[in-house]
Amino acid sequence: MTRFADQTVLVTGALGGIGGAIVDHFAAAGATLILSDRDAAALEARVAALAGAGTKAAAAPADLRDAGATRVAIEAAAARTGPVDIVVNNAGGGNGGGSLATTTAETWAGDVELNLNGAYHVVAAVIDGMKDRRRGSIVNISSVNGLQALGHPAYSAAKAGLISYTRALAVEYGPFGIRANVICPGTVRTPIWQARIDRKPEIFDSLRKWYPLQRVAEPSDIAKAVAFLASDELAGFITGAMLPVDGGLTAGNRVMAGELTLEEF
């Protein structure tokens, strides 16, 4: 495992399924951590648990849609941990409709505010310090929804914007030694799926057929990819890259290929 013993890592959406796995991975790699999410009490409990296991950590509770509150929370946490070396913009979610027909102006704005603007607010809070130190790594979590139409158009548009924003960061801040990359997960087995599992318990089994690797991702699959891109040792010359971590979903459509060729794929 790549070590991050001398680095402070800021993880947003730290209480979620993917965020929790990212926190666990960096903690095991020796990093100091800043955890951000909206539930202050739960964050403090998580920080206490990490401290009990020997990991230095601080909480930065904030609603990332609020630029001012986000900056204040991150700066207060960094005063306890040291400056942020690595940002993982993991926070996100979809509250809009599953189709354009059921999307409203309000739900569209809400999804863009959280998934795209929230990441911008986080980076804005740390980028000047990274420039001064002439180093830093930013890993944004987008989605395969940002690459093709898979429903939830507001969420998807915001995630597509996050890819473009990442490339702008890489180009503009590369001369300061700052790298920025973006990961596009496919389906990940997290608690957020529970409502759909309740409606259709076999949903993950039915989704398997679309993935060449014949499974959906575990949160740890995403955490490992994040750590790779965050690492100057392993990915020091990678910036502006978009990495699908999707079991081959976006490589092609094996189900359609089989129907077209009348052969088994």
Image (spheres, rainbow, N blue to C red):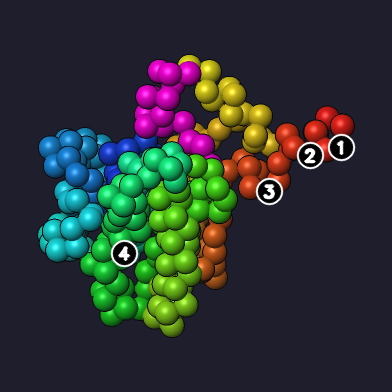
Q: Quadrant of residue 213?
A: top right
Front position among marks 4 and 1: 1
Give the CA separation, mark 4 to mark 1. Answer: 45 Å
Three-letter amino acid code at the position of disc 1? Thr
Give the CA separation, mark 2 to mark 3. Answer: 12 Å
Extreme right residue here?
A: 262
Mark 3 vs 1, N-terminal side: 3
Look at 48% across and 36% down and name the residue there: 188
Front position among marks 3 and 1: 1
Give the CA separation, mark 3 to mark 1. Answer: 17 Å
Where disc 2 sits, the SS reads: helix
Q: Badge 1: how crowded within 10 Å, few (<14), some, or many (20+)?
A: few
Q: Which residue is mark 3?
A: 251
* Labels 1 & 2 near each other (Cβ < 8 A): yes
Q: Main secondary structure of the magenta part?
A: helix
Q: Which residue is mark 2?
A: 257
Three-letter amino acid code at the position of disc 4? Tyr
Front position among marks 2 and 3: 2
Q: Is residue 40 found left or right of 198 in the rendered image?
A: left
Three-letter amino acid code at the position of disc 3? Ala
Q: Quadrant of residue 6?
A: bottom left
Residue 88 image position (x, y, % from top left): 36, 55
Q: Which residue is mark 4?
A: 120
Look at 34% across and 55% down and name the residue there: 112
Residue 220 image position (x, y, % from top left): 46, 38
Give the CA separation, mark 3 to mark 4. Answer: 29 Å
Mark 4 vs 1, N-terminal side: 4
Residue 114 image position (x, y, % from top left): 30, 52
Number of the label disc, if any, that sits on residue 128:
none
Q: Which residue is mark 1?
A: 261
Q: Is residue 125 magenta?
A: no
